[in-house]
Image (cartoon, rainbow, N blue to C red):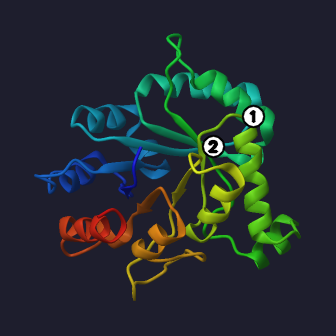
Amino acid sequence: MGKDVIIALDFDSREKTLAFLDRFTEEKPFVKVGMELFYAEGPAIVREIRRRGHRIFLDLKLHDIPNTVKKAMAALSALDVDIINLHAAGTAAMMTAALEGLTRPDGTRPLLIAVTQLTSTDQERMERELLIHAPLEEVVLSYASNAAAAGLDGVVCSPLEAGAIHRRCGASFLTVTPGVRFAGGDAGDQKRVTTPAKARELGSDYIVVGRPITQAENPVAAYRRCVREFVD
């Protein structure tokens, strides 16, 4: 899979989501369905977006005991999405169980990636609130290594960490990176951010972009700008 821009569909209803997607008359962007939309509309919205021809990253960040995650992944595997994720902090046993649950009887499955540390987390918060005192980049690299050892396909990380993860886990180990903003844009609640062009330079395989596209005056133009800066 080559580099691509994934649009985060951060909407709270089917109507808003489809109205947004209707604006794309020439492209079928890769999209992310996260907690807000999935909890509001359920699996039906995923099926509808798939019927429209979009590739889908289902961003639910599962994190529970291995057996629970295995059963949840088995249920989600029926949705025919392209990428799904969990939290690497759930440990190798949980990640292995997730792979087992996600794999269909015919051996196929979506790509499975693990969240290392959220891009809203910085060193100070990690130490003070999570009581993790190693350097943030080393924590991310350790989580990525655990995910690779468990057989996962990649991680969600900051673009700032993508190159180091590829060096540690290999060029084919995917880095899916939120925390991307246009130069001069508002970082919002993100702490570890960069631009699409810089994310490309740093080695991101996919960038996930929400508000800079979804809240733009012209979302299609903003999406095309992202593609130009990151892919072309």
Mark 1 belongs to which amino acid? Met
Instruction: Name which residue lies at 41% across and 36% down.
Output: 42
Left or right: residue 121 versus residue 7 is: right
Instruction: Name which residue lies at 46% across and 76% down.
Output: 198
Q: List the single residue furthest toward the top.
A: 105
Instruction: Name which residue lies at 22% across and 56% down.
Output: 20
Q: List the single residue furthest toward the left.
A: 25
Secondary structure under the numbered disc 2 in the rendered image: strand
CA distance for labels 1 and 2: 9 Å
In the figure, 229 relative to 103: above or below? Answer: below
Measured as percent of width and height from the top left, residue 70 is found at 67, 25
* Disc 2: which residue: 86
* Disc 1: which residue: 94
Q: Quadrant of the C terminus?
A: bottom left
Mark 2 belongs to which amino acid? Leu
Question: For mark 1, does the 10 Å Cα neighbourhood hold few (<14), some (14 to 19), or many (20 or more) residues?
Answer: many
Left or right: residue 139 versus residue 28 is: right
Q: Nearer the viewer, residue 33 or 104?
A: 104
In the figure, 74 relative to 152: above or below? Answer: above
Measured as percent of width and height from the top left, residue 47 is found at 32, 31
Secondary structure under the numbered disc 1 in the rendered image: helix
Q: Earlier in the sequence, mark 1 or mark 2?
A: 2
Marks 1 and 2 close (CB-CB < 8 Å): yes
In the figure, 141 relative to 110: above or below? Answer: below
